[in-house]
Image (spheres, grey):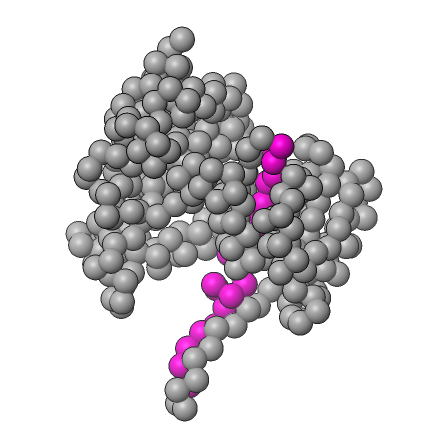
């Protein structure tokens, strides 16, 4: 990304559903306080978009995301559409595919644990052929091309090189053909990174190791579904999904930055949602999406102060969503 794009950059903001608009509002207030030159534009997405347009990802929203410097997305989903023909989650998968954000970065840290999961995001089981046969059999297909594995592996190796130099590649090579190819390609890429120590680990063992001794991991790379499951486990072990951010990156064009947690419709409108994951995702956007590492660190530090001084009810405190945001802005000012 060129430096000229960083001044007055445009952010496509997708407020989403449930608690989404509440936590997005906190993130936008923090951005306006920290980086007033950014242009923040709201666009319909998810259940709100289905109600307004009949589509979870309207064409206007897609075009705005393509044209933006980064996409900041709040959680989507609504029980009303869980079994509908058009669902909010369909728009999410479509947006990922359209922007080709193939590398999903999920950091998790707490005490001695400091790891990064790099999850392949636009291939595998979630994007393979699926359907119902005449005899009632239902199928979902996991497919990968070697080029898809190579590019996400390189992202992971680069991340490991910039961290502690250790990469764990997770697969199920003792059962799955896709995993055997995955392991072969990762080993080929490893030859270009002699300074990075790499190990292969079966996904069931990886889950056990994450639960028992997560401090051993530096960077983990895995295919889409394995990464989905392992990253939620890592988040649960380092404070819960309410604190977990993510960044989804492509080789060109805007990335998508979003909290890991869902839309929590049961607490929507009550003013008690924890906006920490949304704010941490915003920090990842400043760092990875806009090349503003100083502002990213400032926001991360401010969130840490707010977590200490103004925790929300899910963390045993009494601060409101807005109150947490006020604490963040106060920390930024100081």
Q: Residue at x 24, y 48 (%)?
A: 265
Pick the residue in front: 99 or 139.
139
Q: Residue at x 39, y 14 (%)?
A: 331
Q: Is residue 55 left or right of residue 1?
A: left
Magenta stretch bounds: 112-133
Residue 272 image position (x, y, % from top left): 26, 34
Membership of 88 in magenta stretch:
no
* Residue with the most extreme bottom position: 135
Residue 149 image position (x, y, % from top left): 64, 56
Q: Residue at x 51, y 21 (%)?
A: 297
Quadrant holding the C terminus = top left
* Tally of numbered discs: 0
Residue 110 image position (x, y, % from top left): 55, 33
Q: Quadrant of residue 330?
A: top left
Q: Residue at x 34, y 37 (%)?
A: 314
Residue 151 visible in the picture: no
Residue 142 image position (x, y, % from top left): 55, 69
Pick the residue in front: 297 or 49.
297
Q: Quadrant of residue 244?
A: top left
């Amino acid at each position: 990304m060129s430096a000229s794009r960083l001044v007055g950059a445009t952010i496509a903001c997708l407020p989403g559903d449930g608690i989404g608009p509440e936590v997005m509002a906190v993130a936008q207030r923090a951005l306006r306080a920290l980086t007033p030159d950014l242009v923040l534009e709201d666009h319909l997405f998810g259940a709100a978009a289905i109600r307004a347009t009949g589509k979870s990802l309207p064409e206007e929203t897609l075009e705005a995301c393509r044209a933006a410097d980064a996409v900041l997305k709040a959680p989507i989903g609504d029980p009303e559409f869980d079994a509908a023909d058009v669902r909010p989650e369909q728009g999410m998968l479509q947006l990922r595919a359209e922007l080709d954000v193939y590398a999903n970065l999920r950091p998790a840290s707490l005490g001695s644990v400091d790891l990064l999961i790099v999850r392949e995001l636009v291939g595998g089981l979630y994007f393979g052929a699926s359907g119902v046969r005449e005899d009632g059999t239902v199928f979902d297909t996991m497919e990968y091309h070697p080029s898809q594995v190579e590019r996400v592996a390189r992202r992971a190796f680069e991340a490991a090189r910039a961290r502690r130099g250790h990469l764990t590649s997770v697969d199920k090579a003792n059962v799955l053909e896709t995993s055997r190819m995955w392991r072969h390609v990762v080993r080929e890429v490893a030859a270009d990174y002699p300074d990075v120590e790499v190990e292969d680990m079966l996904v069931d063992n990886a889950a056990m190791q994450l639960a028992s001794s997560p401090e051993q991991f530096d960077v983990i790379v895995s295919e889409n579904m394995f990464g989905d499951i392992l990253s939620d486990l890592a988040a649960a072990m380092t404070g819960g999904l309410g604190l977990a951010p993510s960044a989804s990156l492509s080789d060109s064009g805007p990335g998508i930055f979003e909290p890991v947690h869902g839309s929590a419709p049961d607490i929507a409108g009550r003013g008690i949602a924890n906006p920490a994951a949304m704010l941490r995702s915003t920090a990842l956007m400043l760092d990875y999406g806009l090349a503003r590492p100083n502002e990213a660190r400032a926001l991360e530090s401010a969130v840490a102060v707010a977590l200490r001084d103004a925790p929300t009810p899910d963390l045993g405190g009494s601060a409101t969503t807005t109150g947490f945001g006020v604490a963040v802005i106060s920390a930024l000012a100081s």
